[in-house]
Image (spheres, coloured by chain):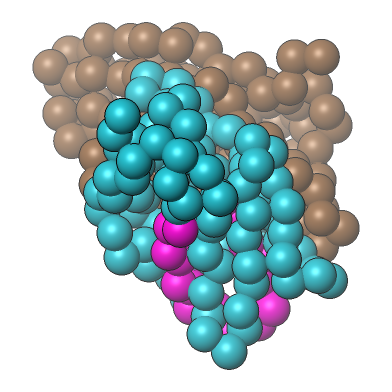
Chain colours: A cyan, B brown
Amino acid sequence: AQSVTQPDIHITVSEGASLELRCNYSYGATPYLFWYVQSPGQGLQLLLKYFSGDTLVQGIKGFEAEFKRSQSSFNLRKPSVHWSDAAEYFCAVGAGRYSTLTFGKGTMLLVSP
Amino acid sequence: NAGVTQTPKFQVLKTGQSMTLQCAQDMNHEYMSWYRQDPGMGLRLIHYSVGAGITDQGEVPNGYNVSRSTTEDFPLRLLSAAPSQTSVYFCASSGAPSSGNTIYFGEGSWLTVV
């Protein structure tokens, strides 16, 4: 069975600083990988996804993620964080065949002035 | 363009009551699923469906029932609500994942069982 690990429960970043959120997955085949963001009391918004091809994926709001098969990782990055990026971020791996997802437990991003 | 619509958005139930969370999509998607979100646990799969008449259990199916009589609708039934079912519930739908289709989520249903 697949699994996703997000090692950091909370991360605090200064506004304007760079950000990297870690995600490691376990899956037997080529994974479909996703990053979602959730603001308090809101639903999930898809930031980006990886299905195949270029291992560096560009998403919305200036985010990008890099798929590294050798490290089983799909880390999310942003060069300069804005206060509005404060939210909870979820990494997820697709089960492939049935379009269901296994989520990590999330990383809460706090942005300090 | 409604996407995935969940109702109700908020609900308070008493222990032992039953209710149905509704989920409808207007994108003609084959695949639909239900997740629950609890603090510190991420989202966990409850049940999913790969087409009308076909459903299967996910990671946390106990206490929940589903059916898929049409492509558009995938209701989630709580048979006898328990406080442990207090959670936020999300419905999702998509086309075939191998083609790179995006998985669309509803806005969530906040359920409190007292």
Q: Which residues are magenta?
A: A20-35
User: What percent of the width, then of the height, locates residue A1?
Assistant: 47, 75
Q: Is residue A79 magenta?
A: no
- Tell me the quadrant of the picture where the C terminus of chain A can be found: top left
Q: Is residue B4 left or right of residue A79?
A: right
In the image, what residue occupies the spot 85% across and 32% down? Answer: B28
> Which is more toward the observer, B105 or A90?
A90
Residue at 52 percent across and 12 percent down: it is: B7
Residue A45 appears in the rendering? yes
Is A79 left, or right, of B35 in this rendering? right
Taking A105 as reference, is B91 above or below it? above
Q: Camera-side residue: B38 or B56?
A: B38
Residue A21 x, y percent position in the rendering: 43, 57
At 64% across and 72% down in the image, what residue appears? A67
Name of the residue lying farthest toward the bottom: A70
Foreground of the two, B61 or B103: B103
